[in-house]
Image (cartoon, helix red, strand yellow):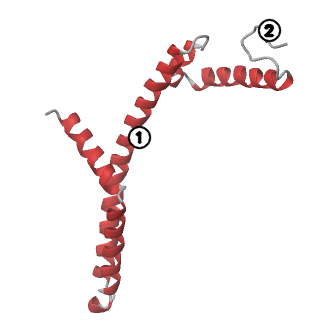
Amino acid sequence: MAIGEWFTRFAKATARASGHPVTFGLAIFLIFVWAVSGPLFHFSDTWQLVINTGTTVITFLMVFLIQNTQNRDSVAMQIKLDELLRAVKGAHTALADLEDLTEAELDEFKARYVRLAEAAKANPEDDGDGEEDESS
């Protein structure tokens, strides 16, 4: 198994586990145990360092796992949206690769669709396809 495939499986499993209510309960329990143990360790610097180090390491690692999950979800969503654009008659398939455009190109598309939205508000009977509404 390739390292990328292994990491993807690991990231998926970790994301599922970390989002589970039992995991949240376990985290609350560990914090409770740490807090209750404070008097035993006289609230020492080492006692504080344990929770600080633990939470920092977990947070650091979770950032990478969350980013991996979001990247995969984003790519999957783009593919699904691209398929919908392709399947809908009259859809502007040029929009299928917007995520690859520059900021300036995206601003041009946005301005175009703002104008279309304003025109639609001005003429609610127009469905935006350039043809007259058959019900009129």
Residue lying at 76% horizontally and 25% vertically, measured from the top left: 117
Quarter-wise, where is residue 35 in the image?
bottom left
Q: Position of residue 49 (x, y in %)?
A: 31, 75
Name the side, left or right, on which 8 lies relative to 135: left
Q: Is residue 95 above or below residue 34?
A: above
Q: Position of residue 127 (x, y in %)?
A: 75, 17
Q: Are marks 1 and 2 in contact (CB under 8 Å)?
A: no
Residue lying at 70% horizontally and 22% vertically, measured from the top left: 113
Q: Position of residue 32 (x, y in %)?
A: 35, 79
Element type at marker 2?
loop
Q: Residues within 10 Å of mark 2 (few under 14, many from 20)?
A: few
Residue lying at 60% horizontally and 13% vertically, measured from the top left: 92
Q: Residues within 10 Å of mark 1 (few under 14, many from 20)?
A: few
Q: Nearer the viewer, mark 1 or mark 2?
A: 2
Q: Position of residue 11 (x, y in %)?
A: 28, 45
| Amino acid at dot 1 | Gln
Residue lying at 23% horizontally and 35% vertically, measured from the top left: 4
In which quadrant of the rendered image does the N terminus lie?
A: top left
Name the side, left or right, on which 77 lies relative to 9: right
Which is more toward the observer, 50 or 135?
A: 135
Reading the chain from its start, which is encountered first: label 1 or label 2? 1
Judging by the rendered image, the residue that carries numbered circle 1 is 70
Element type at marker 1?
helix
Rounded to the nearest whole Å, what is the CA distance between mark 1 and mark 2? Answer: 42 Å
Name the side, left or right, on which 34 lies relative to 101: left
Which is more toward the observer, 101 or 26?
A: 26
Which label belongs to residue 132? Answer: 2
